[in-house]
Amino acid sequence: MAKVFSFFCFLIMFGPFTRAQDSTIKTRQLQAIEINAAPPAVRQQADKLVMTVAGNRLFKTAANGFDVLKKVPGLEVGGDGALLLYGRITPTVFIDGKPVLMSPEALQTYLAGLSSDMIASIALINNPSSQYDAEYKAIIDIRLKQDLTLGWRGNINTSLQRNAYTHNDNQLQLSYKTPKLTYMARLGYTRGTTIYRYQALQHLANTDIMATNNKVPTSNNNFSYQLGADYNFKKNQHIELQLRGFLINRNAYAYNTLYTTDATGQHLIFNTQSMNRYNPTQRNYLVNLNYSGQWGKTQLQLLGSYVQANTRQQEDIQTSDVISAALLDYWKTALRQDIRIRTIQADLSRETGVGIFRTGGKFVYTSTRNNIHYDTLTTEHVFAPDSGRSNNFHYDEYISAGYLSYERKQGKFDLAAGLRAEHTRSIANSITQNEVTKRNYLTWLPSISATYTISENQQIGFSFARRITRPTFGQLNPFRFYNSPLNYVVGNPYLLPSKTNTMALTYTIRSYTLTLNAGRETDAMLRYPEYDTVTNVLEYLGKNMPHKDFANITVSIPLTVTKWWRMQHNISSDYRKEQIPYHGVTYAVGVTDFTIRGSQVVTLPKNVTFDVSYSYRSRSGISLYIAKPLWNVDMGLQRSWLKGKLNTRVNYYDMFNSTTFTIVFREKHIINNQLSHWYGQQRVVLTLNYSFGKSTYRAKQVNKNEEENRAGL
């Protein structure tokens, strides 16, 4: 791998350009460049923290959207692509001010296909106001670059990654703009193999010791598309239609071993292996129809969307004895899941002499249909339906919401207050178990914020908001999702939503930021283990715990050492304390940890940028689990060619193969339970990004957002 990496570096840094050619390119570049003052890398703007990406050297080597997000203060990107803010919040991703209605997997594919060249800025709203949906505990708003020229434009982004396997991701984006109409198409194709490993140890006092090892290589053959049209039929009025599809075709092979000894660890009880071949397919479709209009100081926005996600998966699971090779179990499964989401939303705002009034409403109807069927090989060597594992689960949810908010600027103060009400009605129908769970509740969600501008480069802000977190469909679904034949996760249809009250304090001076968050979450949801000493089955069940207290402090420190050397460090510390009833005892252990994430960016001759990124998270956890320390080091090289139209990047992720997430059950006198997840983060990635097209002339930009103005776009 080291030789491959060195060869890529040589190609990028020393291409086939003579000194005279390079000088010619530089001369031509100067003729096309518009001189703009460099915007600050990080700044506070009303209720959000904005990071400029366009033209920022800190992001030159970022291979995709995930690399960009890794440098957002307080945001962590997990090995599986999951986002976590301030150690506890899963933020909602917006694109150009609108929520991205995608499955988590489709969203990860979208972010992986975004290059840093496409992004103008990123805004972090860590305590959303009542204007936003109650489930948005935090928002990451990615603002894409807006092309101001008429004509057609295109962009190709392709990446090739290699570890034990090869994986290729390709994205093509085309746009055609006229004075009234804009057409857009985005096509994506992913092919290759990813790898995941899972290890578990379960040991109850004076019982068997069981060690699980699971290795899952997954081949991908996925296609995505996004088609859109935006029509400005009148001044300051336009309508937008967007179609999106994400088609997943996979073949996975899970190889699992279960090695079991007696309590002393000296005598073998059984040693089994399981082989599971499955071919998950998923079809995600989205239709968006949006209208926005402005009449003087009044704005109206109407949004309608329809989302459909269809998942199919068949499994062939065979378990045999390692020593004798005798077949012990043989299962076949068929999973069918259909999800439909219908949304209608209206937002109205009016600017008056005493401030801005906003009001709006939203209705969402979600229906899921889940059916999993198990067949088990009997002693008569025929497959028979397995009623103990088969399940049929329907879930319907209706959410009606309305809000009213007020904003006013008074001298150096920016003030905002609002109130949101959300009514939720849901029906969870476990048809197989003949159990129906109904919920019907109204939630009031106030918010208030104030920002004081101390000086041109110095601000301080305070906010309070109450949010609600409803259980996901996976958390409610009573299906068994197996890690091994004796180790599985099961949903709980009786889970309640949690409510969170959060206070946030933000202080910025130039590009330095300090953020404090503290609050309490009631009825927080948690998974906990239950071990059956007779069957050796380990279940992970979902439940609500009484409450969870949390606090976080995050400091972002960018520093320009010289014109060619810049660095940025995000340092944070988290505190959490949950009350978790477990086996007749309520555990409440306060846990404090700290995280350091940094980046060193060096600008070299020949348009080359070098970046070393690193992170360390100390020992962490919750009242029941201890999370072991986690660290990694990444390195990247970037070079631009052809007057900036072509960008090449080489990234070496997780250089020391250190990114393994491991948790240990705290109360070993109950059960010694250890889990670890590894996602094959160590890899070399080569990325090419090329922009092309022919434009006629520069168009007038009527509604240019603040991020684009500050970035000089």
Image: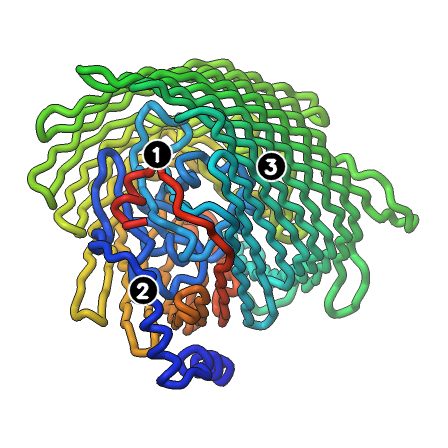
Q: Secondary structure at mark 3?
A: strand
Res 31 label: 2
Q: Which mark is residue 372?
A: none
Q: Quadrant of residue 373?
A: top right
Residue 364 x %, y %: 53, 21
- For the point 7% across and 41% down, the residue is 455
In the image, residue 296 above or below residue 382: above
Query: In this orientation, which residue lies closer to the viewer: 390 or 306?
Result: 306
Mark 2 or 1, which is nearer the eye? 2
Q: Is residue 351 above or below residue 481?
A: above
Query: CA gap, disc 2 to disc 1?
Result: 28 Å
Amino acid identity at mark 1 = Asn
439 with respect to 702 (left or right): right
Identify which amino acid the numbered label 3 is placed on.
Leu
Mark 2 vs mark 3: give the one in front: 2
Which badge, 2 or 1, is on the more N-terminal residue?
2
Image mark for residue 243: 3
Q: Position of residue 614 (x, y in %)?
A: 32, 66
What's the CA distance linking mark 1 and mark 3? 24 Å
CA–CA distance between discs 2 and 3?
Answer: 39 Å
The 10 Å Cα crowd at callout 2, few under 14, some 14 to 19, many 20 or more, is few
709 or 221, nearer to the observer: 709
Position of 326 relative to 8 (above/below)? above
**Label 2–label 1 contact, CB within 8 A:** no
Q: Element under label 1?
A: loop
Residue labelled with disc 1: 703
Q: Which residue is painted at 50% across and 14% down in the image?
A: 440
x, y percent for residue 543: 48, 33
Residue 435 placement (x, y as % from top left): 65, 21
